[in-house]
Image (cartoon, rainbow, N blue to C red):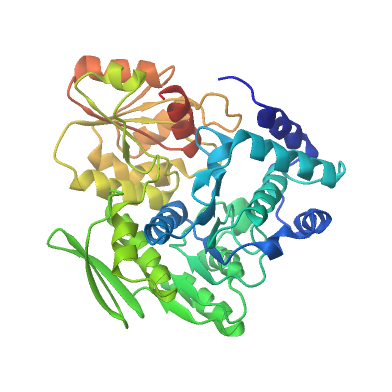
Amino acid sequence: MSTTSSDVILERMLALHPKIIDLTLDRMLRLLDALGNPQDALPPVIHIAGTNGKGSTQAMIRAGLEATGKKVHAYTSPHLARFHERIRLAGTLITEEALGTVLDECYAANGGENITYFEITTCAAMLAFSRTPAHYCLLEVGLGGRLDATNVVDAPVATVITSVSIDHQQFLGDTLPEIAAEKAGIIKRRVPCIVGPQEDAGLDVIEAVAARHMAPLSVYGQHWHVSREAGRMVYQDERGLLDLPTPNLPGAHQVQNAGAALATLRLLGFGEHACEAAVSAAEWPARMQRLKSGPLVDAAGAAELWLDGGHNAAAGVALASVLRDLPEAPTHLICGMLNTKDVTGYLRPLARHADSLHAVSIPGEKATLPAATTAEAARTVGMTAYEAEDVSAALRSIVAHTPKARVLICGSLYLAGNILRHNG
């Protein structure tokens, strides 16, 4: 892949802070002020936090809005193949020229001060959003919420909190209430908040924060309900009932994410057309994505090849549910994870659905879990596990023994991004 001017600037930005993650809003506010506070010039913002489902929910909200002719900005992280994926301007990924321009401006305005990579690139996104007309701006939280770099918009039109579970304990706290408090930090005074399915301990915290801010809540199981019935998705709230197709993003958990997206669209006054598009037109790569072409697909031959970037215990449960619902087939995992993740918690629910696991290290990632460690963790939860030099070697081994296998590459968005970059 050729190096672009934005790649050069992004590489330079990595050196502006000794840590990758250092949660505070002080540096963000300083640089945004130097840039003329572009966060105050954004179109109506929908701010989305949560442990799992943020990206899928954002994609469904965007699909619904765009189906009605609305122009939508969207910010997400991390990217999979190219940084440009993080910034969508009025429905289109930011161009190399536009990205280079805002990155250059942010780098110059920062004046060499300490700032993390995510903070300065989030400033660049907001600068780009402020200069391009749109009807809505969707901001996905990077980590947590309260001190996340995206949490600089004083009056969003809505906030959304998807399912909260244990993850990133080193930054957000060891308990579910502590983590929920960080996610609930995006709630703003009198701004409505849509809340996806939660454990009671997390919901109690979210409700308490909302009460302090007098923020109206729309909570799954109280104010809206969603379920699968007879191959369809049924959504109901005080405005009435919708009978819709199941989401084209596979998995029972996507029905719940769709519910949060529909609750958001309904709050904003959109009708059935937008809601149907939200579930039928949304696309979100590396969420149980069936790979259809590329060198790996060619190497797989008659085998099915799937890709998923989920990486925590809750994601393991959701992925196991998807595998359970697929037609029966010999299923083999190729798994690579980061050393910051709960590998056994992720793998335990998958064990009963996989005939084997081939562990790999994630190419180019300093925080990769060694393949041997992943393989050993898989064995502790009852899996037959092997180590492989890389994904290609693992795939060759699997199809040599089971030509018509279902092969799932999983465990990390960073591994998924590597696959998408090199299998395109």
Residue 42 is left or right of residue 273, and the answer is right
Work out whether residue 77 can be spotted: no
Q: x, y percentage for residue 106?
A: 77, 45
Residue 218 is left or right of residue 34, and the answer is left
> Which one is nearer the viewer's eye here, 103 or 362?
103
Split into 4 quadrants, where in the image is the C terminus?
A: top left
Q: x, y percentage for residue 227?
A: 24, 66
Residue 366 is left or right of residue 226, and the answer is right
> Which one is nearer the viewer's eye here, 108 or 230?
108
Quadrant of residue 152 in the image?
Answer: bottom right
Instruction: Tell me what residue is drawn at x 39 percent, y 49 percent.
Output: 315
Instruction: Tell me what residue is drawn at x 41 percent, y 57 percent.
Output: 66
Quadrant of residue 220 in the image?
Answer: bottom left
Residue 291 is left or right of residue 114, and the answer is left
Q: x, y percentage for residue 318?
A: 33, 51
Instruction: Tell me what residue is drawn at x 35 percent, y 80 percent.
Output: 222
Q: x, y percentage for residue 41?
A: 68, 63
Split into 4 quadrants, where in the image is the N terminus?
A: top right
Q: Is residue 169 above or below residue 299?
A: below
> Which one is nearer the viewer's eye here, 375 or 337?
337
